[in-house]
Image: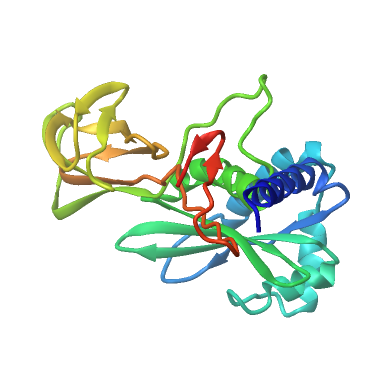
Amino acid sequence: MSARLVAVGLCLVSLAASAQRAGSLEGKKIAVLEFAIGGGAKVQSPDVLSDDCRGAVADVTRAEGAIVITRENMLEVLKATGGKCEEGQCEVETARNLGVDLLVTGNITSIDGQLVLSLKAYETRKGQLLGQKRVLAPKELALLELVKPTTAELVREAFGLGSARPASAKAQPTVQLGSFGETGKDVAVEEGEEVVVKFESEPAGATVNVDGELLCQSTPCSKRIASGRHEVLFQKERYAAARLNGIASKGAVVRGTLAPKFGWLTIETEVPGIAVTVDGAEAG
């Protein structure tokens, strides 16, 4: 296979992907199942969380011509199947019964006192998992703030819509996996009293901004800040930022996980040693 054929092949793949993104959801039906609760999680209003997820799916796919199934239709089918779906068993089958093409599910569990929301997107014909996202929050209200932006990010990635937003749309903060918790004993403090807080990130070496001000040049680090609610932003070159909100108190540990903005591409040819360029730059 010649280098020219390799280049042409890559170009055709790129054009096909662009065409798929442009009209891939026209007339497609999408279902969002009611969120499943497990692992000892205590959630008072799971329907509010799933409604926000459904709304985010509708917002992101509306311009693509997709049809998002209503809660009422969902409940009818769930009632016919017994009303419950164990994760990985009947979600896709429920979606097939609805006659939908794509599916989004949510599962809420509790780990170390944190609420963990796992969102997944499926293609229903083959039952293929297209993508998943996971976020942590200390309370249900904090989790509610993360549902919409996380769902929107999942839908764009899983359904091939890219990350572009209309110029008039308000930019949502980057949301990644993280936690804002405590270690050791919970010690009550007065609002505004200075406390020592430890900041950690995965990967290490991220800068830390608290309430818009640079606090730490490289994680892990421990800094003294005022007790109370803060917004913490972890940033690292070539990684998506992690933005967390929580209440700082004595012994708090703030952890953020930053998703890489890079990946690996493997190209094989019948004839080895052919030069490869990516966006005009030599890549090996």
Residue at 48% x, 71% y: name it: 38
Image location of residue 276, percent across then percent down? 53, 46
> Could you tell whether 220 is left or right of 230 in the image?
left
Given residues 201 and 106, the one toward you in this image is 201
> Could you tell whether 211 is left or right of 56 in the image?
left
Residue at 32% x, 22% y: name it: 212
Given residues 172 and 124, the one toward you in this image is 124
**218 lies above or below 133:** above
Image location of residue 80, percent across then percent down? 80, 77
**241 lies above or below 259:** above
**259 lies above or below 35:** above
> Could you tell whether 211 is left or right of 43 in the image?
left
Q: How is the image coloured?
A: rainbow
Image location of residue 51, percent across then percent down? 66, 49
Residue 194, quarter of the rendered image: top left
Given residues 95 and 274, the one toward you in this image is 274
Residue 261, quarter of the rendered image: top left
Given residues 118 and 11, the one toward you in this image is 11
What is the count of numbered marks?
A: 0
Residue at 37% x, 45% y: name it: 258
Residue at 31% x, 24% y: name it: 211
